[in-house]
Image (spheres, rainbow, N blue to C red):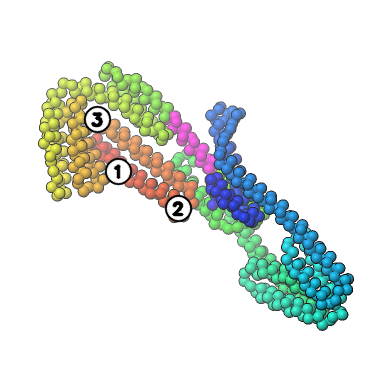
Amino acid sequence: EELSMEELTAELEKMAGNEKVMSTKNHIEEIKKEFYSKYNHLIEEKKEEYSHENNGDSTGFEYNFPLKGQFDGVYNQYRDRKNSHFKKMQSDLKGNLENRVAIIEELKNLIDSGENIKDALKHVNELRDRWKNAGPIPRDKYNHVWNNFHFHIERFYDHLHLDREARDVDFKHNLEHKQKIIARVEELVNEEDINKAFRELQALHKIWKEEIGPVSREHREDIWNRFSELTKQLHDKREGLFAKAKEKEEENLAKKKEIIAGIEMLATEKVAAHNAWQGQIDKVEALREQFFKAGKVPIEVNEETWAAFKTAVRNFNSLKNSFYKDIKKDQQDNLNRKLALVEKAKALQDSEDFDATTPVMKQIQDEWKTIGHVPRKYSDSVWKDFKAACNHYFDKLHEKRNEANTEEIEAFEKKKEYLDSIKDFELTGEHRADLDAIKKHIENWKAMGRVPQARRHIEGKFNKILDALFDKLSLSKKETDMVKFSNRLEQLEEGGDSRKIEGEKIFIMRKVDELQSEIFQLENNIQFFSKGKGDNPLVKEVLKNIERHKEELKSWKDKLKQIRNMKQE
């Protein structure tokens, strides 16, 4: 699965700490290549944004990305460790080569030294032990040095004609060891796990060459030919396995090319709606999953195939990002239009010419409704400013109209007395009876009529008492909220306050829009996580958050439906 730059940096830090620096080399270089590919793509995007903001001029563009400095620091430390290790390894190989050449020289001198047979055999065995433990040497020198050593070992034994018995005992011992190795290789030829068998064969070759001495001349060619023949059989079997694997890899390559072509096609389709883009995103995600499940491809085209896949996905993402950048631009334009309406409303909010100003203010409100979404971070603030300016004006308008309303004054006095009478009202504990009693109080309260605008605070006091009573009832939070909302809506309707009802409707519609946008954003974000990993705590949290938002959205939609039904009645 493709990793982010943060994840690649964390992976590099983990791999760079491995003491076996050479075993992680290829993996680390792949991490570096992927990181720089993503980093360069990011810089291109930032440069494009800078150029767009500066009328196409990218002169003076700079972008600081701290994570790159962190990545480079870790990689440079690893590179220094790797270079030190390589230098030491080269030095060790050179030293081991010098030791082996010295052993050969010692062996040559021993043959011509005239040393007695017993001491000479002991000396040769010591040289063979030293040879076995001399360590690796440069690969290009191995065959020559080993053949040279083996030649002089055989030469030594050929010169043991003075003590044929001792020589024959050693030859016999070596022959038995080599026959055991041949018997084991015969078993390995039938081993199902070819790779395991081949690894053991390599180890047996090392033992044959490094640890076991020569055999008598009469057996040398036959036993070596048998060993070579079995080795060839195992090599041929391994090559057959490789051929099958190669064939499978070619099939996988064809699949991956088809998948890449599918993504490339999607990256050229013109899509102009969010819902349609969601469908495209799902298709690409499905193709990505198929790509990762398709298996290995031939190593010589692995990098090329991976690069083509990443390019196809990147091109698709660029097209997608371009679409959503345009949406952001539209939202910015909407914000500018709404800010202009806020300024108009503020300029008119203190006007005393109600006959001339009221139609203009209503026209401003109507125009506001036609404007789409604005960037989320400005949504609340611009709405509050607009609502405050409108409320300020219309509150003054209603206050003016209600100044001389005698009936409203009488209603206020009645409600004031009624408020005092229900302060000591106690619930019986009988759920249905208590709820009916509360509703009866609400009906009585509504029957008393409207109160002057300037004294509407008494409604708040009544609602506060209702809130306390509702809190004592065993209703669900949602049910309580809906009862309270119905009561408040009925109060607004009874009061003939169409402006506030309309304001409530606009507020609810805005909440519905905001929640839908947030749900969309959360569902869009979750596309970036690998599908199928339900145990990821971050994914779980996002899914829970989506569910909470959907429940809240349903509640607001129920309220909107109630307002619309009320306006139709």
Total labels drawn: 3
At 70% across and 77% down in the image, what residue appears?
180
Q: Which residue is mark 3?
A: 498
Q: Which residues are magenta?
A: 315-334
Location of residue 209 in the rendering, given as x and y in whole percent from the top left corner: 75, 70
* Residue 182 falls in image quadrant: bottom right
Circle 1 sits on which residue?
Answer: 555
Residue 24's place in the image compared with 381, above or below, is below
Mark 1: secondary structure: helix
The residue indicated by pointer 2 is 536
The image quadrant where one finds the C terminus is top left
Q: Amino acid at mark 3?
A: Ser
Instruction: Tell me where residue 141 appears, x and y as whole percent.
Output: 79, 60
Q: Is residue 232 visible?
A: no
Looking at numbered disc 2 in the image, what kind of residue is underneath it? Asn
Distance between the alpha carbons at the discs numbered 3 and 2: 50 Å
Comparing marks 3 and 2, which lies closer to the viewer? 2
Residues tagged 3 and 2 counted as in contact (Cβ below 8 A): no
Residue 122's x, y, as percent? 79, 74
